[in-house]
Structures are given as structure tokens and as C-alpha cells.
Image (cartoon, rainbow, N blue to C red):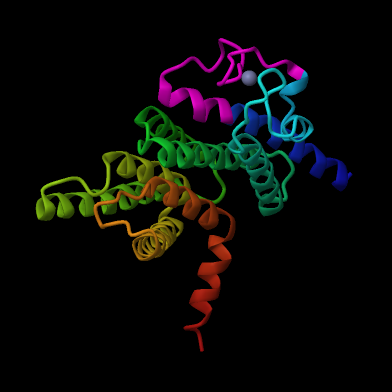
């Protein structure tokens, strides 16, 4: 049974990841998610269903379009595999097969994948993704066994509030935007779903990893401080880590002080 469940979660993850690719590609371009059917970005020929099987079609076609032989972006199989791996990690994290929390966790990590990649490619974090999910997270909170509505609200205000403060201080100091307000809205959503302790952890991970990558880029790629990092991508990664491993990390950290 367990093996069957794992295979099922992986297949669902791959298929859902294939849909997330469509969202990542079309949403920032203002295109419909439903029509038209997928076409090759190079030659415009419609992609047949048997050439649209997650990961497998990419491997079978050698990463090239069947018709024009132009390269298919590696991002497609990467997003599909990543989504499957994340769903599997969520499954092992919850160990309650297909309960409500499994689905909401999957929805949460899916939104982080979408926002993370859109921010990386376009340097925007669409409010029409984050704000409805913020509302959903708050509506869902009273039905959770691990977080109350009040805790969700505190998480949202702390996450969004902290970034808003950073945004304001930077703006007054440098007279331009360091963070975007999209980052602020994203942290409202992340905070509402994770609650205060995991929100603090997310901000910590995102800032530290962002700073390390920023310093490495300046050192080795000769980027200047003017170079804008997609901070939303770092928040996305940090929030996934906080969701999956945050509680044990916090418990371990607190145990260091209990003697
Ligand atoms: Zn083509």
C-alpha cells in the first residue's frame, strides 16, 4: 500500500507540476491558463498529448521539439520533478494520507514554486496570486489543528510588517525601492499560513541565503550593489524549508538552552 501511495503522490506531483509550468509561463504574459493548448515557443506547432507527458516526453525527445528540433527549456522537466519531490516531502511530513492539511500544504508549496520562478524570470510577484492565497490562508486557519486564526493573523502581520518596515527604511534612506511591495504581500501570505515562529525562520533563511548569494555574485560575477536579487525566490525557498523542517529546527535550537 505504502509503495502505491508514494507512486500516486509522485504522479500527481508530476502532472500538477506540468500545470504549474503553464501558470509560470502564461500568467506574467497575461495569457489564459486554459486556451489555447500548449504550442512550441519556437515553431508554434501544437504539442501532442503524447509529447506532453511530464519529464518522460522531455527525455524521449532529447529535450528538442518533435517538429522544428529547437531546444525545449530545461525549466519544464525541472519544475515537474521539483513539484513531485515537494509533494512527496509534504506527504512524509504529514503522514496523514490525503487529509485536508496534505492538500493545503501542496497548494502552499505550489504557490511558492510559481512565485519563486516568476520572480526569478520577471522580477515581479503578482498580487493577484498572493492576496487571494492570503485570504484563503486566513479563512482556512480556524479549521486547522496546528494554527488558530489569531496565530495566522499574527504571522501575516509580523511577516508583512517586517518587510514593510525594511521597505520604508530603505526608501527613506536611498530614495528608491530596495524590496518591492510584492515581497511584502508575499510575506503576508506566507506568514498567515506558517504562523509566527516559522515566519521568523523564513525571514531569517531568506535574508541569510539572499545575502550569501548576493555577496558571491558581487565577488565572482562583478555585479554591483545596484543589481537586484529576486528576493521572492529566496522567500519561496526559505518558506518551503520552514514548512518541512522548521518545527524540528526550532525545537533543536531551544533545547540548546535547556540545561
Ligand atoms: Zn517547435
| Relative height, residue 175 to residue 119 (above, below) | below
Q: Residue at x 53, y 18 (%)?
A: 33
Could you say which quadrant of the image residue 7 lies in? top right
Residue sticking out furthest to the top = 36
Q: Which residues are magenta?
A: 21-49
Q: Tell me, yes or no, whether the highlighted magenta stretch contains residue 68.
A: no
Q: Tell me, yes or no, whether the highlighted magenta stretch contains residue 33.
A: yes
Q: Residue at x 51, y 57 (%)?
A: 242
Q: Residue at x 46, y 16 (%)?
A: 31
Circle count: 0
Q: Residue at x 30, y 49 (%)?
A: 228
| Relative height, residue 65 to residue 105 (above, below) | above
Query: What percent of the width, then of the height, locates residue 44?
Result: 58, 14
Figure quadrant of the N terminus? top right
SS majority, magenta: loop
Q: Is residue 114 left or right of residue 244?
A: left
Query: What percent of the width, then of the height, locates residue 99?
Result: 68, 39
Q: Is residue 225 left or right of residue 190?
A: left
Res 77 seen here? yes
Which quarter holds ligand 1?
Answer: top right
Amino acid at each position: 500500500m505504502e509503495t502505491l501511495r508514494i507512486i500516486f503522490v509522485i504522479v500527481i506531483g508530476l502532472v500538477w507540476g506540468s500545470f504549474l509550468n503553464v501558470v509560470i509561463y502564461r500568467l506574467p504574459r497575461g495569457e489564459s491558463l486554459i486556451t489555447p493548448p500548449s504550442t512550441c515557443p519556437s515553431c508554434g506547432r501544437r504539442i501532442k498529448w503524447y509529447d506532453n507527458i511530464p519529464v518522460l516526453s522531455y527525455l524521449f525527445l532529447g529535450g528538442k521539439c518533435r517538429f522544428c528540433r529547437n531546444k525545449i527549456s530545461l525549466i519544464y522537466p525541472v519544475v515537474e520533478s521539483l513539484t513531485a519531490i515537494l509533494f512527496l516531502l509534504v506527504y512524509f511530513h504529514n503522514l496523514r494520507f490525503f487529509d485536508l492539511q496534505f492538500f493545503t500544504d501542496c497548494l502552499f508549496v505550489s504557490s511558492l514554486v510559481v512565485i519563486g520562478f516568476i520572480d526569478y524570470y520577471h522580477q515581479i510577484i503578482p498580487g493577484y496570486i498572493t492576496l487571494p492565497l492570503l485570504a484563503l490562508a486566513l479563512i482556512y486557519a480556524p479549521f486547522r489543528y496546528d494554527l488558530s486564526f489569531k496565530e495566522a493573523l499574527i504571522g501575516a502581520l509580523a511577516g508583512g510588517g517586517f518587510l514593510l518596515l525594511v521597505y520604508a527604511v530603505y526608501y527613506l534612506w536611498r530614495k528608491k525601492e530596495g524590496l518591492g511591495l510584492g515581497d511584502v504581500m508575499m510575506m503576508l501570505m506566507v506568514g498567515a499560513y506558517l504562523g509566527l515562529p516559522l515566519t521568523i525562520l523564513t525571514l531569517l533563511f531568506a535574508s541569510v541565503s539572499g545575502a550569501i548569494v548576493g555577496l558571491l555574485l558581487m565577488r565572482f560575477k562583478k555585479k554591483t550593489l545596484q543589481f537586484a536579487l529576486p528576493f521572492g525566490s529566496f522567500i519561496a525557498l526559505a518558506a518551503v524549508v520552514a514548512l518541512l523542517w522548521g518545527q524540528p529546527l526550532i525545537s533543536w535550537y531551544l533545547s540548546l538552552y535547556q540545561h
